Image (cartoon, grey):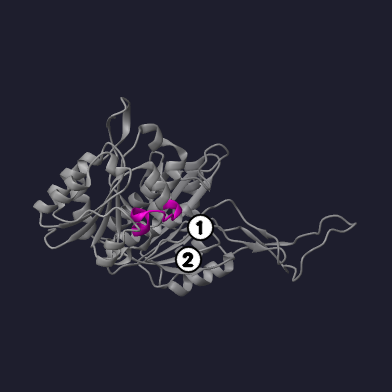
Amino acid sequence: MLAGKRVLLIIGGGIAAYKALDLIRRLRERGAGVVPVLTRAGAEFVTPLSVAALAGHKTYSDLFDLTDEAEMGHIQLSRAADLVVVAPATADLLAKMAAGMAGDLATTLLMATDKRVLAAPAMNVRMWQHPATRRNVAQLAADGVLMVGPNEGDMACGEFGPGRMAEPLEIVAAIEAALVPDQPLAGRHVIVTSGPTHEPIDPVRYIANRSSGAQGSALAAALRDLGARVSFVTGPASVPPPPGVEVLRVETARQMLAAVVGALPAEAAVFAAAVADWHVTGAAGRKLKKGADGPPALALAENPDILATIARRAEGRPALVVGFAAETEDVTAQASAKRLRKGCDWIVANDVSEGTGIMGGAENAVTLITETDAEDWPRLPKAEVARRLAERIARHLA
């Protein structure tokens, strides 16, 4: 399956780097070509000579090597492969990837590539569980970076838990899946709404909420990875849209509804946006000033109900309409009632009460409510919630 494929392998600096040697051997057994890149930290664990001998190819390590640049510039190197694999992907490498840093050859290649990237994380359990790493992983997933592992087990440092790099054969399987992906949603069109809406009070101020757009962005990426053509209707979110989707940017709820209607027809529509319930009627055309009479009186009008409007369409209704319900109490009961009230097929409910860290955070804990069941999912990274939901959508449409 990998015969003739070319893998650019970036080896990070961790004790798991020794597994990269076996990974190279396994890839070459399957007919894949391996172009190795060894970070400075990686060279503390494995030698350029051993890597090159197993790969049957020169090992690259220096961004400013004039000979290497003359033979194959780093831009060309980053794009000549079918897939870029980072193994081990240390906490430091993941952080640099998430921040878009390009200070050495490895990170520059990752920034310059136009190919998919697969990372195999490896680090101490506490580093893997650190909030900064969880944020970085969520950001990378939203950016379309694939992950394999980490596994749970004994660490070289003597601790036990998740953080061990996936075994070479697991990584090979993930490489095969990335290069020859199963795309059950190929040819299907899915609409995803995401982020908050901003309802203007005047040219400076607006009504909004704390939604970051992270869950919607992760969901659009997961549906894209399953082959769907995704129309991504996003309010002014802090998390960027994933690559490879059609991005429709809006500000207000009324603009979002118009964009969704304009994107129809679609086989499925997922409404993950946190839409403001009200807008200010007659928003001021210039900045409102403080006055002796106190704060201005704001007249509010109800925004259109985007979920209910699409779910109750007589013509052109998607076969599957999925809503989201952010609740602070009686989550399942409130969300079940919302599903019936809106007329949608499924509701993804979550508890966003104070202290959960869900709204704007890197993780989510949801209950999937359908016509027949309410299924509690454990607290997971938002990218994993998105992957599970995308797979359920694919199975339903099949």
- Please, what secondary structure does the residue beneath circle 2 have? strand
Mark 1 vs mark 2, CA separation in Å: 9 Å
Q: Which residue does the image show at 29% across and 52% down from the upper left?
A: 61
Q: Which residue is mark 2?
A: 233
Of the residues shown, which amino acid type is indicated by label 2? Val
- Residue 60's tag is none
Residue 365 visible? The answer is: no
254 sits left or right of 77 in the view: right
Q: Quadrant of residue 6?
A: bottom left
60 is higher (above) or lower (below) than 189: above
Q: Is residue 123 rendered magenta in the image?
A: no
- Residue at image position (59%, 65%) is 252
Q: Residues within 10 Å of mark 2 (few under 14, many from 20)?
A: many
> Could you say where residue 336 lies in the image, as x and y percent from the top left?
46, 47
- Expressed as whole percent of the image width and height from the top left, the position of residue 1 reads 12, 58
Count the numbered circles shown.
2
Report if residue 107 lies within the magenta region. Answer: yes
Residue 251 at x, y percent in the picture = 58, 66
Q: Can you name the residue that lies furthest to the right here?
A: 292
State the extent of the magenta-drawn residues as a range: 98-110
Which is the main secondary structure of the residues drawn in magenta? helix
Q: Answer whether labels 1 and 2 touch (C-beta < 8 Å).
A: yes
Q: Residue at x 51, y 68 (%)?
A: 249
Q: Nearer the viewer, residue 235 or 328?
A: 235
Q: Which residue is mark 1?
A: 273
